[in-house]
Image: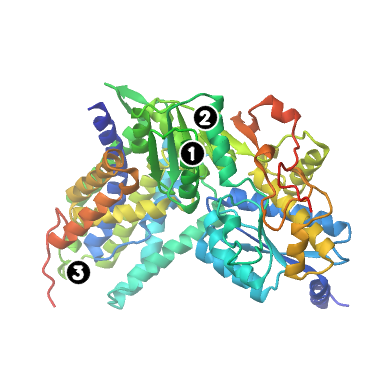
């Protein structure tokens, strides 16, 4: 029992990381119908910028700066890669541009920060805490709390503020929102800023647990994509549940079946969801009018 | 000459000197990963090779010609390694190649050298199969040589350290899912089976995995007294840190990659005490080693004076000297003649790891034997000798393979 609990706790921490990155996919998909395939690289850049800043200031002071950096990086991606594709009504142009921007970011990071994985100094004690035989790192708790907090903050912003309402309106019907005088282009740019900001935040949250390096985002970005598909690309609840399912499935399968197969259940679930409910477990299916 | 034409003339003069140099030089390929997770090994190896080549050139080169290194980054990827091999053979026309860090890359690329009859000296990659891909009767001559401790030696030493020295009876194996990890795992299981021991857990993980809880819990629940590893630096650090998280500390004994700087730095205090087989430990306990360490530090100025991967640097350095001796003996840059010279090397090559006296024969392409390898241990961020006796008795000759022709 204790072992199962330990596996689930580790799975939750892992799953919340996936959920937070998946949340970023969702933000841009809601407003523009496009995704930033460089989400993993946005996370990596956030972590590396954070690592550089942490040499000069405290971890907590660094976070707002990284958020600003993330937002600027998102705006850059949108302006350079996505906006031209949306303007020309290209169905798939943004896929190629976000992927190629991701590769460019990775190479730039390799040139600036080197090819090696570096340790990120932990802001919290590295001694694990014990609850009834289950051991948790303080940092893991921070990941879960931090992820939930930023998702909640973004949701509140969308529901309560006037700018947020513009985002929601654009998500619901871009053309109608445009006719109502909402600058939908600006809203899309803004959603990219928010999306990369959450990814950069995820980066500085996970970096003390993993290692920091130019390639850290590749696997995380891919798994988060699976989470976004499983949970549904337009459901906030979906990414959290999807992330938890994938994270817990990984750790428990690793223990009870075989560590060689730990990625299989998550991917099976992905196939299953795509076959039965393509909009995701919590997603609303949209009828596309042509 | 006015100020505008001066740079142009300088460039022309430089180009002229380069082409004159190139026409006359002996081209030697250097293939290794200079980027990515294996880069500490690749870059140290390259620096070792460069150091040796510079020394040889300073003494007038080989056969009166300078050595020119053609360095290519194989990125630790098999397909990239194949491209590099083809470029070095067909475009650059190298007379031989040294290098290869990753077993998978070696295995994928060497075929082209074998076909072209150009010798390769593997100076780091350790897979047991590396020198045994092209054996008679199918291939009359094997062009693949090695001066690194292969996995058969390493796994035997790891098992000896765990079972014979420390008297553990329950051990777990943790290996990554690459060629390197899985071939090493097979070798470890074989070496354990020879002592009638079955590992209590055999676990696998992927490169870049961030959570090792499941693997470690399985080992812990099975009652493992030690963890035997086959992986590279960053993931090894995740294992050490994961043990700390689970509040479970057993010794880590594993392949030589536990000496990588990216394991030692990222694991910090959790990596303390990890043990691994080493051909070279950064200790100036012979005059040759002292000179080598000083030269390396002076040329590359590594942080804290610590070579990122001392074993790779030393073996890279030695491979260049072995090859140079063979070319000198062959009196020619023809691949067949170099191979024959390597297989019957008359000159004693004074290397960093050992003095190579007839390192190879026609049927034995391994320069390093088990008696040359020592156990290293991580202590205060450095790799030191695990046994004081090894430090005093640092340089040993090849055990059985000494050519008696």
Residue that numbered label 3 is attached to: A178
Q: Position of residue B273 (x, y in %)?
A: 56, 28
Residue that numbered label 1 is attached to: B229
Residue that numbered label 2 is attached to: B162
The vertical placement of A110 against B374, above or below, is below
The residue at 44%/36% (across/down) is B239
SS under mark 3: helix
The vertical placement of B126 against B269, above or below, is below
Rounded to the nearest angstrom, the CA distance separating label 2 from label 3 is 70 Å
Crowding at dot 3, Cα within 10 Å, few <14 / some 14-19 / many 20+, comes out as some
Residue A216 or residue B91, whichever sits in front: B91
SS under mark 1: strand
Rounded to the nearest angstrom, the CA distance separating label 1 from label 2 is 12 Å
Judging from the image, mark 1 belongs to the subunit labelled B
Judging from the image, mark 3 belongs to the subunit labelled A
Q: Looking at the image, do the residues carrying marks 3 and 1 touch, with CB atoms under 8 Å apart?
A: no
Judged left or right of residue B297, residue B173 is left
Q: Position of residue B21 (x, y in %)?
A: 82, 71
């Amino acid at each position: 029992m204790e072992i199962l609990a330990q596996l689930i706790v580790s799975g939750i921490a892992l799953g919340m990381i996936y959920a937070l990155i998946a949340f970023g996919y969702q933000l841009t998909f809601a407003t523009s119908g496009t995704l930033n395939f460089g989400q993993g690289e946005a996370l990596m850049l956030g972590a590396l910028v954070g690592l550089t800043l942490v040499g000069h200031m405290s971890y907590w002071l660094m976070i707002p700066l990284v958020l600003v950096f993330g937002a600027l990086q998102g705006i850059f991606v949108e302006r350079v890669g996505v906006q031209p594709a949306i303007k020309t009504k290209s169905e798939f142009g943004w896929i190629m541009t976000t992927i190629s921007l991701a590769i460019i970011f990775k190479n730039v990071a390799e040139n600036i920060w080197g090819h090696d994985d570096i340790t990120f100094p932990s802001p919290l004690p590295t001694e694990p805490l014990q609850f009834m035989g289950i051991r948790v790192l303080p940092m893991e708790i921070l990941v879960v709390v931090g992820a939930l907090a930023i998702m909640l903050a973004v949701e509140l912003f969308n529901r309560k503020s006037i700018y947020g309402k513009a985002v929601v309106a654009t998500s619901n019907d871009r053309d109608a929102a445009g006719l109502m005088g909402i600058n939908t282009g600006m809203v899309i740019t803004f959603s990219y800023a928010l999306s990369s900001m959450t990814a950069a935040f995820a980066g500085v949250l996970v970096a003390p647990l993993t290692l920091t390096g130019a390639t850290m985002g590749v696997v995380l970005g891919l798994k988060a994509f699976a989470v976004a598909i499983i949970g549904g690309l337009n459901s906030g609840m979906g990414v959290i549940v999807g992330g938890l399912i994938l994270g817990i499935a990984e750790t428990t399968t690793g223990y009870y079946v075989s560590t060689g197969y730990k990625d299989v259940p998550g991917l099976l679930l992905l196939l299953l969801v795509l076959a039965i409910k393509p909009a995701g477990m919590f997603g609303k299916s949209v009828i596309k009018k042509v | 000459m006015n100020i505008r034409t001066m740079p142009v003339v300088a460039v022309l003069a430089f180009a002229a000197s380069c082409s004159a140099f190139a026409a006359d030089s002996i081209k030697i390929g250097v293939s290794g990963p200079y980027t990515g997770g294996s880069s500490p090994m690749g870059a140290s190896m390259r620096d070792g090779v460069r150091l040796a080549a510079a020394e040889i050139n300073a003494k007038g080169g080989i056969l009166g010609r300078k050595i020119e290194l053609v360095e290519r980054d194989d990125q630790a990827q098999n397909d990239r390694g194949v491209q590099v091999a083809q470029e070095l053979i067909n475009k650059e026309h190298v007379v031989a190649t040294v290098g290869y860090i990753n077993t998978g890359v070696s295995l994928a690329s060497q075929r082209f050298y074998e076909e072209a009859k150009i010798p390769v000296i593997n100076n780091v990659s350790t897979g047991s199969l590396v020198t045994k891909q092209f054996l008679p009767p199918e291939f009359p001559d094997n062009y693949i040589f090695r001066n690194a401790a292969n996995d058969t030696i390493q796994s035997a030493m790891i098992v000896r350290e765990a079972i014979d020295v420390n008297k553990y009876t329950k051990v777990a194996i943790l290996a990554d899912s690459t060629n390197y990890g899985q071939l090493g795992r097979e070798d470890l299981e074989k070496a354990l089976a020879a002592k009638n021991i079955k590992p209590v857990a055999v676990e696998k993980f992927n490169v870049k995995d961030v959570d090792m809880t499941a693997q470690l819990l399985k080992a812990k629940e099975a009652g493992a007294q030690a963890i035997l590893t086959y992986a590279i630096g960053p993931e090894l650090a995740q294992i050490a840190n994961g043990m700390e998280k689970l509040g479970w500390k057993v010794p880590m004994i594993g392949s030589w990659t536990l000496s990588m700087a990216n394991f030692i730095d990222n694991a910090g205090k959790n990596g303390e005490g990890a043990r691994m087989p080493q051909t070279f430990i950064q200790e100036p306990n012979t005059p040759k080693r002292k000179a080598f360490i000083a030269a390396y530090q002076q040329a590359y100025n590594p942080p804290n004076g610590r070579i990122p991967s001392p074993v790779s640097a030393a073996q890279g350095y030695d491979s260049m000297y072995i090859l140079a001796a063979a070319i000198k003996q062959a009196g020619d840059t023809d691949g067949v003649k170099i191979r024959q010279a390597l297989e019957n090397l008359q000159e004693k090559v004074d290397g960093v790891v050992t003095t190579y006296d007839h390192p190879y024969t026609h049927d034995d392409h391994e320069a390093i034997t088990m008696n040359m390898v020592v156990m290293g241990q991580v202590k205060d961020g450095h790799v030191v000798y695990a046994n004081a006796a090894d430090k005093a008795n640092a340089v040993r000759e090849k055990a059985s393979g000494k050519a008696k022709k």
